[in-house]
Image (cartoon, grey):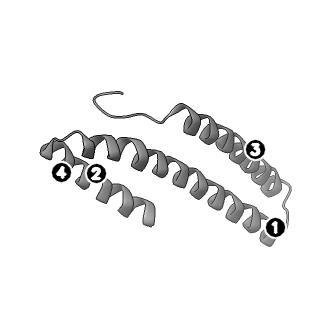
C-alpha cells in the first residue's frame, strides 16, 4: 500500500511488465518500418496491433484495480472511503472508455 492506496499485485505486475516489454519491441519495429519508408498500410496495421495490446494491459490493470483496490475500499466499512472510491472509479471508467 502506498499513501493508503493499494498497489498492483505481484502477478498482475509481472504479466503487465511482460506485455509492456513485447509492446516496446513492437514500437521499435514500427519506428524501423517508418525509417525504412515501408508501406503506410503495413505501418498502420502494426500501430493498430500496439493499440490493442495496450488496451489489453489496461484491462489487466483495471481488473487488478477492481479486484483489489475497489473491493478493499468498499469492504473497509468506511462510508467516506467508499464515496471517494466511487468518485475515483467513475473517473477511471470514463478515461478508460474513451
Task: Check disc 4 and report the residue beneath it.
Answer: 83
> Label 3 crowding class (10 Å Cα cut-off): few <14, some 14-19, many 20+?
few
Tag 4–tag 3 contact (CB < 8 Å): no
- The part of the image, by quadrant, that contains residue 45 is bottom right
First along the sequence among labels 2 and 4 = 4
First along the sequence among labels 3 and 2 = 3
- The part of the image, by quadrant, that contains residue 36 is bottom right
Task: Check disc 2 and report the residue beneath it.
Answer: 88
Residue for point 37% across, 34% down: 6
In space, the residues marked 4 and 1 are separated at their CA atoms by: 47 Å
| Residue 42: image tag | 1
As rendered, which of 72 and 52 lies closer to the eye? 72
Tag 3–tag 1 contact (CB < 8 Å): no
Q: Which of label 3 and label 1 is nearer to you?
A: 3
In the displayed structure image, the side of residue 63 where residue 37 appears, left or right: right
Tag 3–tag 2 contact (CB < 8 Å): no
* Quadrant position of the N terminus in the picture: top left
Task: Check disc 3 and report the residue beneath it.
Answer: 25
As rendered, which of 54 and 11 lies closer to the eye? 11
> Label 4 crowding class (10 Å Cα cut-off): few <14, some 14-19, many 20+?
few
Amino acid at each position: 500500500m502506498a499513501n493508503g492506496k493499494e498497489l498492483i499485485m505481484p502477478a498482475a505486475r509481472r504479466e503487465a511488465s511482460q506485455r509492456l516489454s513485447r509492446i516496446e519491441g513492437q514500437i521499435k519495429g514500427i519506428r524501423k518500418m517508418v525509417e525504412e519508408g515501408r508501406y503506410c498500410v503495413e505501418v498502420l496495421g502494426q500501430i493498430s496491433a500496439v493499440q490493442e495490446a495496450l488496451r489489453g494491459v489496461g484491462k489487466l490493470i483495471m481488473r487488478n484495480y477492481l479486484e483489489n483496490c475497489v473491493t478493499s475500499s468498499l469492504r473497509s466499512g468506511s462510508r467516506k472511503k467508499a464515496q471517494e472510491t466511487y468518485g475515483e472509479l467513475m473517473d477511471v471508467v470514463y478515461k478508460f472508455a474513451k
